[in-house]
Image (cartoon, helix red, strand yellow):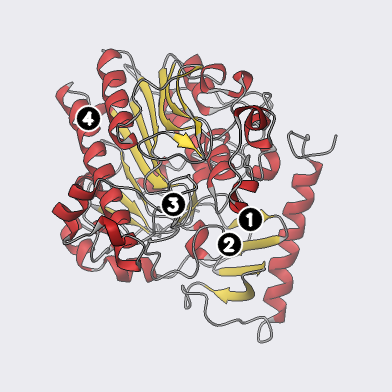
Amino acid sequence: MTPTPLCRRRFLKAAAAGAAAMALGGCAAGAGRSPPGSPGRRRGPPGRPPNILLVVSDDQGYRDLGCFGGPEVRTPHLDRLAARGVRLTRFYVAWPACTPSRGALLTGRYPQRNGTYDMFRNDSVDQDHLYTPDEYAVSWEMVGGMDTREVLLPQALKAAGYTCGIFGKWDLGQLRRFLPLQRGFDAFYGFTNTGIDYWTHERYGVGSMRRGNEPTTADKGTYATDLFRREAVRFIRECGDRPFFCYVPFNAPHAASNLSRPRPGVQAPPDYVRAHYGPYDDGIADTPRARRQRYMAAVTYMDEAIGEILRTIDQKGQADNTIVIFFSDNGGGGGADNGPLRGGKSQLFEGGVRTACIAAWPGVVPPGTVCDEFLTALEVFPTLCAAGGAAPPAGVALDGFDMADVLAGRRASPRREMFWQRGGDRAARVGQWKWVDSAAGSGLFDLSKDLGEKEDLSAARPDVLRMVQSRFAAWKKAMDEAEPRGPFRDF
């Protein structure tokens, strides 16, 4: 029997007025297994396959988009993108911080299945330790990386005839065998670790920018967002009529990585902050309002960069044959607005793992619509493979499904479950129910009535708690039994 569509489709002028209400809307009830790892039918067009632009922001708050009800932040270009496509209000990432979230996106596999289920990050910087080049060269941040047996999205698309480029934050390994050019990309300009200073491009004093496989300081002193915009525009122009996959993972609005005191947080040009968000004194920058101003300015600056990338596609006459997807890698950090969700980056509450997502797909997604379906970043890999006519990797278990028909409003999402684990912190969503067991707090919540995860129903609904915990245990068993991947698994 054909499922009743659960996406509410509205024109943007109606949806914008109710953005906050949409964010609060209930989820489809029901508890079952997550959809099997199959991308479904191949949807490659008979002629030229669609271009793909995948843009990922860094630590952006759920409400920090105008089209998601942000009362302060200005994102006119992303708002226009939403008017061309669909806003996804119940879209989840696979981990509440950078590295595993990005690894899951590019593999279509849970972090616990692909082996990258924690950060490649040095912790001594938290105690103000400035690494020497020799120390950094043998540190975990430098030598850790995603298992080379994993098949990444650009590898699948490249086999289908795509030219693939990445411009921005890589974060899946810094040794040569882990770098983008060895993982399916044809072009790379960006940084390979988890965070940099926006102008020096250093990670706690260590230069981090690369072109291809080689380090570069040629653009030191230029605001990073400008560089990633420049390189993405150049790549799209140089692709000509060849189908492209352009992945633009901005570092904005992630906090800068340096050891100055006070820590700078998110960086933005002071004049730009003043021009867009009012009086700002760089000499007293360590106040909540000043940090919020810089954060919003970094988001708006990124929005302008995205606007130029979209204009470039339009100028080439390719807008009608380009899929565009935008979302944040996890919930917002310092300075962000995750309302009405609880928590933020690094936490397993909704504010850490539910992110604002926009998808524009001419001819497939009706413009100016809203989808309240249960969807995740695990769906991106199989969806884009199907759209581009790319065969999924043989013998590889994927954890998502082709969501094109869901975005188009033709069917309900088959997803009923999603699971998260970060160290000792655990969480699961099964239907309308969300269970969290973490150092930041625990409980059982009914998301259809309590999006802010305020009322713990563990005592009132022990039957539901046991059910959700049993589903988590089954997922954990499946992950433990999967073919082991490095670098964390013991095998």
Taking the spot 38% from the left edge, 61% from the top edge, the residue there is 336
Residue 320's disc number: 4
Q: Amino acid at mark 1?
A: Trp
- Residue 314 is drawn in which quadrant? top left
Foreground: disc 3 or disc 4: 3
Q: Are marks 4 and 2 in contact (CB under 8 Å)?
A: no
Secondary structure of residue under mark 2: loop
Q: Which mark is residue 420?
A: 1
Closer to the camera: disc 2 or disc 3?
3
Q: Say which element carries label 1.
A: strand
Q: For the residues carrying marks 3 and 1, which lies nearer the camera in this image? A: 3
Camera sees residue 360:
yes
Residue that label 2 marks: 348
Q: Earlier in the sequence, mark 1 or mark 2?
A: 2
* Front position among marks 4 and 2: 2
Q: Position of residue 284 (x, y in %)?
A: 30, 62
Kindly report the distance in space between the C-alpha atoms of the residues bearing marks 3 and 1: 18 Å
Neighbours of disc 3 within 10 Å: few (<14), some (14-19), many (20+): many
